[in-house]
Structures are given as C-alpha cells and as structure tokens.
Image (cartoon, rainbow, N blue to C red):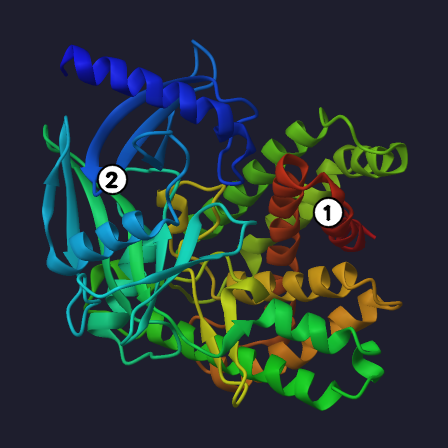
Amino acid sequence: MSSGDVERYAGMTRAIAAWLPQARWYGGRAAAELTVADACAADGVTLALVDARPAPDRQPVRYLVPVTRDTGVDAACTPACERWLVEVIATGRIVPGMHGSFVGRPVGGPAPSPAAPIAVTPLGADASNTSCLVQTAAAGYVVKLLRRCREGVQPEVEVGEFFARQSPFTATPRLRGWLEYRPAAGGPTTALATIHDHLSGCESAWDVLGRLLAEQGLDGPHHDRIMRIVAAIGHVTADMHAALAARSDVPPFAPLEVTPDDRVAAATDLVAHATSVLSVAALAGSLPTPLAARVRRVVDAREALCDRLRGVADVLPARLIRVHGDFHLGQVLVAAADDRVFVIDFEGEPGRTLEARRAFAPAAKDVAGMCRSFDYLARHARLPNPTAVAATLGHCFRAAYVSKAAGHAWWPADSATADRLVEILALDKAVYELAYELRHRPDWVAIPLAGIEASLS
C-alpha cells in the first residue's frame, strides 16, 4: 500500500467512524478501532472491507462499507454503487483489490442489464443488512449488501442457487447472482452482496396481516382473508420443506437420518444456547423496574427452562433437513392481486455462525419460528386478546402445514410428538429473541419474555 493510500484510507476510516455507531447493521456500541482490510474503486464509490476492533484484546469484526470517495459517507443505496454491483455480478467481472479480488458470480438465465439506467429505492431500515430495489426499464431487482462479512458458505447464496438450478420450487424470488471476495492467498471466500428478482405488487406478510388485524382484529371484516393468507403460508412452508428435502443426491441438502448422538447433540445445543443467553440477560441494565424483575425471574428459572429444552431429544423426527432458519412474517411476501405468498431471505438467524445457519434441523424449527411471529404480530398490534389471536393464527397455519407435511420423514408421525417439538423449539426461539431484543430493541423485550413465561407456567 502506497503512502497515498495509507493517508486516504486513514481519512476514510475517520469519516466512517463518525456515522458507523448509528448504523442499524453495526454490531457495536461505538466505532472502535477501524482498519481498511481491503478495498476497490467502484465508479466514484470505494467498496471497502472494514475491520472494527472493539477492544485491543478482541478479534475484529469485518463489515462491507461502500462509501463516497470524497466524503466517506455510506453509499450503499446510491445509483453509482448499485450500478457497479449489478454490472460486476451480471458480467462475472473480477475487480482487483489490495489483497484480494471482488468477483461477480452470475447464476445464469436472464441477468440484469448493467448498462440500463436505474432507479434505487432503499428497502427497510430495521435490518442487519442493506437492501435496495433497483429498477430498470425492463425489470426490477433486489440487491442486498451482506454487511457483516463472514468467511465461508453463505446460506442465502447456497439455498438461492439450489432453488435456481436444482429445484422446481418457485415460491421464492430467483437468485440472479452474487458478489464474493477472494483473498489473494487463497482460503475461504466471503459473500458480500446478492441480486434477486423483485416481485412487484407484494408486501411483507407482517405489514399485510398487521393492517388487516388493525380493523377489529379477528372479529373484524377481514377475518376470512386473514385466515386464507395464514393457511397459504402454511401450505408454502410445507412445499418449501419438501423441496429442501427432495435432493438426496445433492450433499448439502440430502436429509440426515437422526441418530441417538443427534438427539443428545440437539438437547446439548439448545441448553448451551439458553445458558449463554440467560447469563447475558442476568447482566442487562437500563430496563424499567417491572421488566427487569420479569427478566430476573426468567433467569432464576433457568433450570426449569433447560429441562424443557432437553426434551427435544425425545421428539425429533426421523430425519433432519435444511431449513429456512429465521422464518417469520417479515420473510414472507404476499401478492396484492391474489394473496399468493413467497418466501425470502434464506440467510438464517444473524446472531448465529454460518456453520450453525447451514446445519440440518427439524422442519419444526421453521414452524415454531412462524408461530412465534404470530405472537409478535398480535402483541405489537396491541390487540386486546393477543394470546388468543396468536393461538388462532398458529392453529390455522399449522393445520395447513400438516395437511402437506404429514407422511414425510422430516415431520413427526404422531401429532402429540409434533406439538411438543414445536413447543420446545418455540421456547428456544423466544430465548433467541430475548437476546436479540436486549441488544437491539429494548422496547420489545416484553414480547419474547411473555413467550418464555408462558412456556414455564
């Protein structure tokens, strides 16, 4: 690196440090010590991989940070950055950096036209990544920047490529390609961004159902439509699981026969996760006194909670499969024209490692996640009877799901066993949610707390 580069990147990191702590996708509380690990020029934008070291004795965390060259402000959703990403990914171009290469990986089929004029619209601010709608005269695409850079196989890419090339499942936007970083010295690559088809005329199921429930809940004029949408989500979820389990000839997706060791490992993992979360929750501060007291009671009940989680060893199905991994109403789109539903964002839970996100799991993990999402929806909407509303939606969803999942080796044959498995995995999900809300949205802590308390009652 030349002296000019050193000076330029030092100035860039100072500019980034001024706004980084406010970024929703940044995992720290302060900008910490920043270092540019690699970068490349991108049509007036610098695409930088920035290492943030929170303390001298801690390992740095790497982020993808596109910035304007003159001011160092975030440029992720600028036309210049998005046009560059589309062009590199669509053409498979290799762009050299200082210590590696930024490589476009098209998936095949019709690709975005890099030369077309584009309009860019940011999609959502409350996310661990940055997504933009990129529209050309011919079509629209969703470009997602995977802000936290993790070496290895990214499930968003792996599952997207599987559906695009090796599965007839079409209830998901097609992956058109991705950008990856390859170190010059070799070793694991890092997925940095993806391009998917944009499904026009769709909204998230969270927004659609929330709006419909706002008019007198399930007693209002939209009861039948609400239940049709929820049933459609159940049907598509079962179709998704069937597709993910259908290719025993594709090793990353070949279902696994459950062994006694798998049962022990599943219980051990759930207990270890809960123990870790509750240890952090015990130190949580700045919560209102009544809420802090409820957290303390849950922490004090950790043995009873862990005993419930250990029960997963007795109720696992015959096979484990690849699953969505972070399944909730925000990951489902509803078409305004006919209420068809589509599944998006196969990235997995952002708080877990890539290895954990790619792990085979019971299909019930996704079922439990969606049931927890109904609870979130009912409580966030401040309905007068949120528990009953969530239960009704969950029952409709599960009945529709089981109508297609029954008979598959990845779903328990006995309904009581299936119910207990979903309950245990819903408790695990609520524990995960508690950690997430304590870190990112303290105002929402009461929602997963209520789920944990209900399980322990």
Q: Name the residue beneath numbered marker 1.
A: 444
Q: Which residue lies at the image location 32% right of the left edge and 29% below the top edge?
A: 70
Q: Quick one: 445 or 253, which is closer to the camera?
A: 445
Q: Name the residue beneath numbered marker 2.
A: 44
Mark 2 surroundings within 10 Å by alpha-carbon count, few (fewer than 14), some (14 through 19), many (20 or more) = some
Q: Position of residue 82 (x, y in %)?
A: 30, 53
Reading the chain from its start, which is encountered first: label 1 or label 2? 2
For badge 1, the amino acid type reads: Trp
Q: Quick one: 35 or 174, which is closer to the camera?
A: 35
SS at mark 2? loop
Res 101 quadrant in image? top left
Q: Is residue 59 visible?
A: no
Pick the quarter of the image with the N terminus.
top left
Q: Nearer the viewer, mark 1 or mark 2?
A: 2
Instruction: Tell me if 301 is positioned left or right of 89 in this view.
Output: right
Q: Position of residue 318 (x, y in %)?
A: 43, 67
Q: Are marks 1 and 2 in contact (CB under 8 Å)?
A: no
Q: Is residue 40 above or below residue 230?
A: above
Q: Which residue lies at the image location 23% right of the left edge and 14% below the top edge?
A: 6
Instruction: Tell me if 456 is positioned left or right of 237 in this view.
Output: right
Q: Which mark is residue 187?
A: none
For badge 2, the amino acid type reads: Gly
Q: Position of residue 457 (x, y in %)?
A: 83, 53
Q: Is residue 437 above or below residue 199?
A: above
- Spatial CA distance of label 1 from label 2 is 40 Å
Q: Is residue 198 visible?
A: yes
Mark 1 surroundings within 10 Å by alpha-carbon count, few (fewer than 14), some (14 through 19), many (20 or more) = some
Q: Position of residue 446 (x, y in %)?
A: 78, 47
